[in-house]
Image (tube, grey):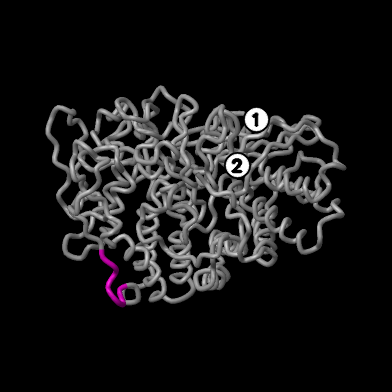
Amino acid sequence: MKKSTFILLTVLVLTGQSFYSCKKALQQPPLGSVSEELVANKNGVNSLLIGAYAALYGMQGENQSLGGGEAWQGSPSNWVFGSIAGGDASKGSDGSDQPAIDPIANFYSDANNTYYNGKWKALYEGVSRTNNVLKFLAKATDITPEEGKIIAGQARFLRAHFYFEIKKFWNNAPWIDETITDFNQPVSTELWAKITSDFKFAYENLPATQGEIGRVNKWAAGAYLAKSYLYQKKYADAKAIFDVVISSGVTSSGKKYDLNASFEDNFMPGKENNPEEVFTIQMAANADPSGPSSGNNGDMLNFPYGGSPFGCCGFFQPSVDLVNRFRTNETTGLPYLSNYNDYAVKNDMGVGGGTAFVPDQGTLDPRIDWTAGRRGIPYLDWGNYPGAAWIRDQSYGGPYGPKKNIYWQKTAATDADKTTWAPGSAINYLVIRFADVLLQAAECEAQAGSLATAQQYVNRVRARAANKEGWVYKYTDDANPLGGFSDVPAANYKVSEYPAGDFASQGQAYALSAIYYERKIELAMEGHRFFDLVRWGIAEKELNAYFTFQGKITSDVRRGKFTSGRNEYYPVPQRQIDLSIQGGTKILTQNPGYN
């Protein structure tokens, strides 16, 4: 259970607009409609701010997104739009289930795909909630100037986050702030300036620590501001802020930013709110009796299928291409940056459960077994992953299962949410974690700073992976996985730091390729990959190579083709364009290539 120092999110309805949310130990009924006078005060504004935080979940109710569509359309993890579309994972399940994902994964979808409209509406609901905070903050007379700055800093941070998502999805979109009364606005080409202005305000006005862990602080704003500069290729500006965040940044509870000792600690509720969490969406199991609305509802499809203890639904299977990237050179312990698929990791495609299978015996980066369920390797404490028995259609989605979003058997009573037909969980979603900060900073150093410092940041991440205390180990007794783990590694793990002077001696292009590769394996299945490929300008090359390789193994991506000039951004939902028509003229315009 999360401690009482977390924000408790309640429910507020104001002038016909719902502000829905919930948190682990509290689920209040709607308070009804209230007048503006009752909201334009400290209590009312803080309730609105809590509602704005709740919009981070991207969904409400049993399986509904804030946009009214299915919860997985608005999921904050971007498992469809960032990970599947980026080649981290196959859609999974089978071709008949959630078929709208297939066109997104293969880049042939059009603007009528319901997933786009669901995500658009969920994000703009977040924008609306933050604008209401700022609107009523300006009318409140019982809030001191200092209190007002802290409230405004949080609201503008959250608005910038929602707009950062909008920007990376659709590039140009309408800007709506608390001063705008006509919400039917054309797309803006100035989103980056407005996003960075909001993050800058938050960075300059938020305190270093907060009384409630779930609230954002100065350092989260600094990290996000630097990330915004990085996306704009303003590397020197980003580097200057990353330098300060890395050296001085602390969590909202005052812990100095650092990597967790074990990679897996990032995905265990019992280890939450640790030094690696920079900006986190606080998830809670069993807070809502109607379903896991604050318990990763948008990811409830992403558990092993069939005979698994989870029951549903077989989606989000790590791709063969992703797993192959965890191969390391048996001598150097370094990855194969350009030809990793030439050293493929052995898998059990087509090997039935009744046939013996010996897992790969070659050297591997240990992060592989915290990222993907592989046959014969411990699947947390649920037993050795059995392969096809937990997969709905191996020929369609491949041999692997997701792992970072899975709760442990020993803590299922508190970490699992089974209030509806598919599981939720209490595993926080990490929008930004410190390893992500280090690798972004490494990019900035390689582009506008020191290659030696870039290597230092990458090696810091790799050193954590090399720590044997954080590896996966075989069970003491396979028949009783809850009995604990032995001191025998589950696979032949070998991962090393890059040797001294390597980046500097081999040059910028090599350094960047190593940084990009490290982001792929460190942040795999966390929703970043597609957006990284686009901002690096290599999406067409990487994704079409992925389709060529993966399509020979699984049937789900055989139609895949990425087209530069079109597929870098998603189509503006046709429903939103239709709603914008005034006097026969469309106020919203479509992105290039989708007309």
Amino acid carrying label 1: it is Arg
Residue drawn 80% across and 63% down?
Answer: 145
Per the rendering, the mark at residue 490 is: none
Q: Secondary structure at mark 1?
A: helix
Residue drawn 31% across and 53% down?
Answer: 367
Secondary structure mostly taken by the magenta-highlighted segment of the chain: loop
**In the visual, does 281 lie left or right of 52?**
left
The foreground one among 520 and 428 is 428
Q: Is residue 463 above or below residue 151?
A: below
The image quadrant that residue 192 belongs to is bottom right
Amino acid carrying label 2: it is Asn
The image quadrant that residue 236 belongs to is bottom right
According to the picture, the residue beneath numbered tag 2 turns out to be 591
Residue 152 position, x and y percent, is: 73, 56
Which of marks 2 and 1 precedes in the sequence? 1
The Cα atoms of the two marked residues, 1 and 2, are separated by 14 Å
Q: Secondary structure at mark 2?
A: loop
Q: Please check the rendered image and state whether residue 501 is part of the magenta-colored stretch, yes or no.
A: yes
Q: Which residues are magenta?
A: 496-502
Residue 466 position, x and y percent, is: 28, 62
Q: Nearer the viewer, mark 1 or mark 2?
A: 1
Residue drawn 16% across and 64% down?
Answer: 331
Looking at this rendering, what residue extends furthest in the left direction? Answer: 356
Residue 583 position, x and y percent, is: 81, 30
Residue 530 position, x and y percent, is: 45, 47
According to the picture, the residue beneath numbered tag 1 turns out to be 575
Q: Is there any visible trace of residue 113 in the rendered image?
A: no
Disc 1 residue crowd, few under 14, some 14–19, many 20+, Cα 10 Å: some
**In the visual, does 387 lie left or right of 508?**
left
The foreground one among 143 and 338 is 143
Q: Is residue 469 above or below residue 585?
A: below
Q: Is there any visible trace of residue 6 in the rendered image?
A: yes
